[in-house]
Image (cartoon, rainbow, N blue to C red):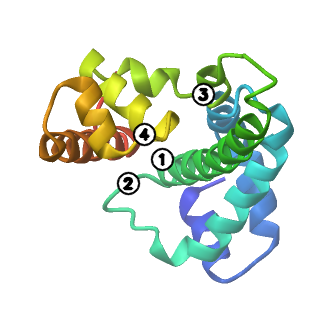
Amino acid sequence: MDNEKIIERLRKRDEDALYDLVEEYGPILKGVISRTLSKYPHLWDEAMNDTLLNIWNNIEYFDSSRSSFKNWCAVISKYNSIDLLRKESKYKFTSINESLADDNTDFLSKLEIEEVFSLLDEENKNLFKDIFLKSLSYEEAAKNQGITVNNAYKRVSRTRKFLRNWYGGMYEK
């Protein structure tokens, strides 16, 4: 089916257009979702439903001069999947903190942040672990790293900006 017809029907709030959307782009959406949520297959259906709802609710923001419809839908599915991954990670982080005294597992892998840490140099990785995983203050983390507190704030700020850009797809691994 033609992209323009699906887009036009979605803008006119034709619910049957969603069926055509799933038929045409379902495999792409499922692929993006399954890769992003590979360790959480129980979230795949929720991610697909959220993706379809967001496409339905935001179709008026689609601009063919900026992106193809296929890519626009794939980006929506990617961001929905990341949001679900964040929620799941936050839930798991709470569970890990509650059972940390009893369970001596490697909770970094449970938070699925190895990939993020692999992007950082050793100094920034250690600073992030001290501040965000060990819950040390910036002063304590700076002292551990042998840097000033002001330097710790600047490094964290730069690293956060880098990670936001990386998650936004501006950087390749």
Q: Position of residue 157 (x, y in %)?
A: 24, 48
Say whether disc 2 or disc 3 marks the residue closer to the N-terminus.
Answer: 2
Say whether disc 4 or disc 3 marks the residue closer to the N-terminus.
Answer: 3
Nearest to viewer (mark 1 / mark 4): 4
Query: How dense is the environment of label 4, judged by Cα within 10 Å: few (below 14), some, or many (20 and up)?
Result: some
In the picture, residue 33 is in which quadrant?
top right
> Would residue 95 appear left or right of 115 to someone viewing this image?
right
In the picture, residue 139 is in which quadrant?
top left
Q: Would you name the residue on which mark 2 appears?
A: 67
Find the distance from the CA under tag 4 to the CA under tag 2.
Answer: 43 Å
Nearest to viewer (mark 4 / mark 2): 4
Q: Are marks 2 and 3 in contact (CB under 8 Å)?
A: no
Nearest to viewer (mark 1 / mark 3): 3
> Would residue 43 appear left or right of 159 to someone viewing this image?
right
Say whether disc 4 or disc 2 marks the residue closer to the N-terminus.
Answer: 2
Q: Would you name the residue on which mark 4 appears?
A: 136
Q: Position of residue 147 (x, y in %)?
A: 15, 31
Circle 1: element type: helix
Q: Would you name the residue on which mark 3 appears?
A: 112
Please name the amino acid that badge 1 sits on: Asn
Q: Position of residue 13 (x, y in %)?
A: 71, 81
Q: Are marks 1 and 2 in contact (CB under 8 Å)?
A: yes
Circle 2: element type: loop
Q: Are marks 4 and 2 in contact (CB under 8 Å)?
A: no
Q: Would you name the residue on which mark 1 appears?
A: 71
Please name the amino acid that badge 3 sits on: Glu
